[in-house]
Amino acid sequence: MPSLKDLKNRIGSVKNTRKITKAMQMVAAAKLRRAQEAAVAARPYAERMNAVMTGLAASVGGSDQAPRLLAGTGDDRVHLLVVMTAERGLCGGFNSSIARLARQHAQALMARGKTVKILTVGRKGREQLRRDLSQHFVGHVDLSAVKRIGYVDAQGIARDILARFDAGGFDVATLFFNRFQSVISQIPTAQQVIPAVFEGAATSMLYDYEPSEEGILADLLPRNVATQVFTALLENGASEQGARQSAMDNATRNAGDMINRLTIQYNRSRQAAITKELIEIISGAEAL
Amino acid sequence: MAGTLQFDLVSPERRLASLAVTEVGIPGTAGDLTAMEGHEATITTLRPGLVRAVGADGVRAFAVTGGFAEITASGVSVLAESAVPVEELTGTLLDKMIDEARSLAAMALPEDRDTAEKLVHDMLALKTAAGH
């Protein structure tokens, strides 16, 4: 049975923890709003880009001159997994869920005899994958100094990926990130970027292309990689804050429950002590 | 009075403009072009330059550094790599972009040298056009 003083200290420390988690929850909520706004603001560009690319890919994709970024290298031996996670923890299962998906993916590929290379974005994912997959690491992008994710950050990552592709470093590249659904639900997603895959039906619009279809496609494919990386980063940013908000909300509630339980225990012990003292006094008086 | 067309200018980070205009001047890679209502559906890549949207309430110009434009009979969407309204464009910002283009040109492989140097010249022309 802990002493009254111990209980009191315990309650004090849980109260402090609750204050911290509550503050973190509110900060995450504010950041989430901003991250969501950024994701929404980026949507028109990505959608238009995708629509145009889908049309282009449909008309050029079948030909022999299709660029390698679209048609692939004709091989799928070496896979590059771009694992995007957060720089910070305390956001529930956010980082683990991406790491888990990437790990499953890597193991499935290795079981089929493929070579796996991993590029990590964000410290947490790297730490989680280091134990069993560190020999596959080929690089790391550190975004801890970045306060607000901008298109330039995505361009940097895309340039890194494209440089590796041009150097023949891999055949297939896949992005791993969390797609933001709501505060309580983020969906770990694997998205292949090289060779490019396009969803949705091509619009039947017929365009004139200036300079040429192939020229435009060659110009746009690298941009498309950057756009997809940017979208993934923004989705991830919003997911991270959402996950943190709900994790901290849970933590705050748990701390509250714990404080209630400890307070009841404290009061019972205190009453027991008082009762015991009274009994001692009374029985002492009766004995006289 | 010519018919209007919908003009959208979006950068990866935000939508800069969405308005009804009568004509849009676009700095295409293969040369400048002006889109008006009923233009043939066209997709063109951009070189650094000024996108000028002429509407009922005057001309709005934006400096873009690259990207592409999708022109249809009823609208123009410019998807710019980065875009700045001309009013916010300052000499220092331009100089920074020019320096960036120069360093790219210096690094470029021989076969890309021409393209990279064209970029520098486009940037310099953009600076003149913006009046700095």
Image: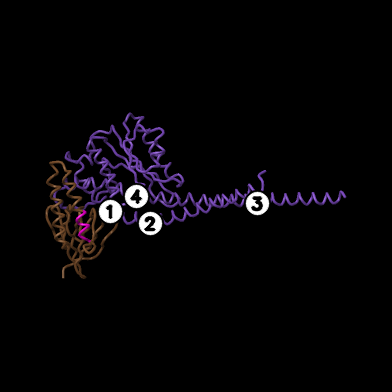
Marks 2, 4: nearer the viewer? 4
Q: How crowded is mark 1: few (under 14 residues within 10 Å), some or many (20 or more)?
A: many
Residue at (34, 43) in percent of width and height? A121
Q: Which amino acid does label 2 sit on?
A: Arg
Measured in 3D between alpha carbons, the distance from the residue under mark 4 to the one under mark 3, in whole angstroms, is 46 Å
Residue farthest front in this picture: A288
Query: Which circle, 1 or 3, is nearer the viewer?
Result: 3
**Distance Cα–Cα, label 1 vs label 3:** 56 Å
**Residue at left offset 13%, top offset 48%:** B117
Q: Residue A146 carries which label?
A: 4
Q: Chain A is drawn in which colour?
A: purple
Q: Is mark 3 on a helix, strand or loop?
A: helix
Which quadrant of the figure contains the N terminus of chain A? top right
Q: Dot 3: within a 10 Å radius of its alpha carbon, few (fewer than 14), some, or many (20 or more) residues? A: few
Question: Residue A273 versus residue A22: which sits nearer the camera?
Answer: A273
Amino acid under label 1?
A: Pro
Please give the range of residues in magenta: B89-96
Q: Which chain carries label 4?
A: A
Identify residue for label 3.
Answer: A264
Where is A94 relative to B42, above or below? above
Same-subunit check for callouts 4 and 3: yes
Mark 1 → mark 4, Cα distance in angstroms:
17 Å
Q: Are marks 1 and 4 on the same chain?
A: no
**Secondary structure state at the residue bearing disc 2:** helix
Kind of residue indicated by mark 3: Ile
Q: Name the residue under label 1.
A: B12
**Which is the main secondary structure of the residues drawn in magenta?**
helix
Q: Name the residue tied to disc 2.
A: A34
